[in-house]
Image (spheres, grey):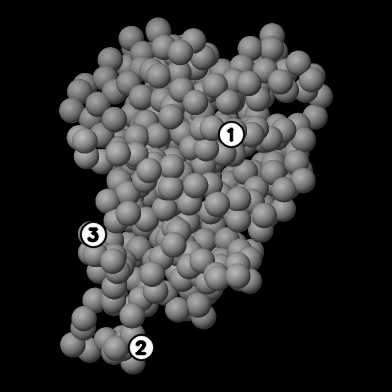
Amino acid sequence: MTKLTTAILCGGVSPEHEVSMNSARNIYKAIDKAKYDVVVIGVSRSGQWLHLPEDEFLSLTSIETGNNGWPLMLLPGEEQVVQYRPLASPPFGGQGGLQFPNIDVVFPIIHGPFGEDGTLQGLLALLGLPFVGANTLGASVGMDKDFTKRLLRDAGILVAPWVMLRKHETPDYQAIAEQLGYPMFIKPANMGSSVGVSKAEDLEELKTAIATAFKFDTKILVEEGLKGREIETAVLGNIENLQVSGVGEIVMEKGFYDYESKYISPDAAKVVIPAENVSPADVENIRETALRAFQVLGLEGLARMDVFLLDDGQVFVNEPNTLPGFTNISMYPKLWMQAGVSYPDLIDHLLTLAIERHQRDGALQRTRF
């Protein structure tokens, strides 16, 4: 069997750089090396694309231009779309005369802005490369929490009431408080891993939280704090054949599920799979809501759908995550492991879906006649 060359694309310029590196290492270790030749492309914090050697990649937590890997260049329209960049003094002894391998499929695992917001997906589409995850439109609307809410609301899917603010505007804090009540959650519109997210219990905390969120985005959301259980489920497949996993729950002893509790102090949160004491009817409602939201947002490949389950059984969609964390302890792969899909098999299935979608879309007529 001829092996396919898979490029794992990681790093990036967002605050989720380290999260991406952790996800990428786990994918690299688990991918079936008998079926795939794997190359790792790291995007440095300054945006340079680099071919990372295996020994260095496995020990890196951050990619820095000039210190890691061999610089690459992208040539849309060429047969060899990714090539080594000529250097007068190449690092690591240079790559003289060597050719970067032809890529059959890309697993982009760059989280946050310029990774899962449609920009990278558009670039990969222009390069003509199959890639895992949502297409350009799905990634961009799935990343922007304001657009996500508008689309879901218009489709009749429940979302928490919110106010959208832009950085050049002066917020009317009192009006926001009267409209939404306390507590509120304040979020950058285009950020993941709870970066820049705060909870406000009073007016002073609201002001501080809004200022914090505006450090990361020019558009932010102030949301009503719903009193419900934080439930997550996983969707897998292209639009023609979708599957939804069972449900898991994030249980916090105190506070909320922020960046620190996800990655720095993971003992602060307990991940329960399957979620306990959720009725079969509620489980089915959550799964059906997740599937509908996935379709409304135009997603494909994969997404983790985060919802709130209220005491009265109502399901509110919090947000999708179109490129969820992919460590072996992350919720998305763990949900599928609970459903009987191993971590290596999940990676293989996602790569197969990427190639199938690329072939499907490539068969469309590109001329008028």
Tag 2 secondary structure: helix
Which mark is drawn over residue 92? 2
Which mark is drawn over residue 241? 1
- Residue 12 coordinates in the image, percent (x, y): 36, 57
| Mark positioned earlier in the residue sequence (2 or 1) | 2
- Residue 137 coordinates in the image, percent (x, y): 34, 34
Q: What's under tag 3, amino acid-wise?
A: Pro
Q: Quadrant of the C terminus?
A: top left
Gap in angstroms between the C-alphas marked 1 and 3:
31 Å
Q: What's under tag 2, amino acid-wise?
A: Phe
Q: What's under tag 1, amino acid-wise?
A: Asn
Q: How many marks?
A: 3
| Drawn side of residue 361 relative to residue 276, left or right | left
Residue positioned 23% across, 30% down in the render: 167
Residue positioned 81% across, 24% down in the render: 277
| Drawn side of residue 9 relative to residue 268, left or right | left
